[in-house]
Image (cartoon, rainbow, N blue to C red):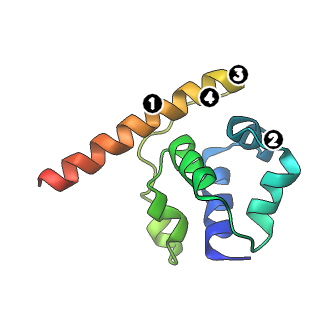
């Protein structure tokens, strides 16, 4: 399994999402998402961007080769138990805004 797959799985587990929930938010079948985590395949860039937004992490987090680099990658986390897929998609958009704000703050420094 490649670095990207390992990191996606680690972040998903850290956030407490099931593969089914992530697949629903991405709009892909669960077996497809399972392949993203378990097979060394090329994941479409658009999908990586959606995952980045949904997880609230920078895209670069998926490429981190040191597990310690993942510890502080979460920009924002929400309790999402019992939320609908539509609600999770809305939260994903909000996380994208927060990520971009954090990036802009880093650039300004």
Q: Is tag 1's residue or tag 2's residue first in the polypeptide sequence?
A: 2
Quadrant occupied by the N terminus: bottom right
Instruction: Locate residue 6 relative to residue 53 in the image: left or right.
Output: right
Q: Position of residue 62 (x, y in %)?
A: 54, 64
Viewer-nearest residue: 43 or 95: 43
In the picture of the structure, the residue carrying the numbered disc 1 is 94
Q: Which mark is residue 20?
A: 2
Viewer-nearest residue: 64 or 27: 27
Badge 4 local density, few (<14 within 10 Å), some, or many (20+)?
A: some
Q: Is residue 78 visible?
A: no
Q: Position of residue 108 (x, y in %)?
A: 13, 51
- Distance, label 4 to label 2, CA atoms, is 13 Å
Q: Which mark is residue 80?
A: none
- Distance, label 3 to label 1, CA atoms, is 15 Å
Mark 4 touches mark 3? (CB < 8 Å): yes
In the picture of the structure, the residue carrying the numbered disc 4 is 88
Q: Position of residue 20 (x, y in %)?
A: 81, 41
Identify which residue is drawn at 54% across, 50% down.
49
Identify which residue is drawn at 69% across, 36% down.
25
Viewer-nearest residue: 15 or 87: 87
Q: Which mark is residue 84?
A: 3
Badge 1 local density, few (<14 within 10 Å), some, or many (20+)?
A: some
Q: Is tag 3's residue or tag 2's residue first in the polypeptide sequence?
A: 2
- Distance, label 4 to label 1, CA atoms, is 10 Å
Identify which residue is drawn at 42% across, 58% down.
72
Residue 39 to residue 92: above or below: below
């Amino acid at each position: 399994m490649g670095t990207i797959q390992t990191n996606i799985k680690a972040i998903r587990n850290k956030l407490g999402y099931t593969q089914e929930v992530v697949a629903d938010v991405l709009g892909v079948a669960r077996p497809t998402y399972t392949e993203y985590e378990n097979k060394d395949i090329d994941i479409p860039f658009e999908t990586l961007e959606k995952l980045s937004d949904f997880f609230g992490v920078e895209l670069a987090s998926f490429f981190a080769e040191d597990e310690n680099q993942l510890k502080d990658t979460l920009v924002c986390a929400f309790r999402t138990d019992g939320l609908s897929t539509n609600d999770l998609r809305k939260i994903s958009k909000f996380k994208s805004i927060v990520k971009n704000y954090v990036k802009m703050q880093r650039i300004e420094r």
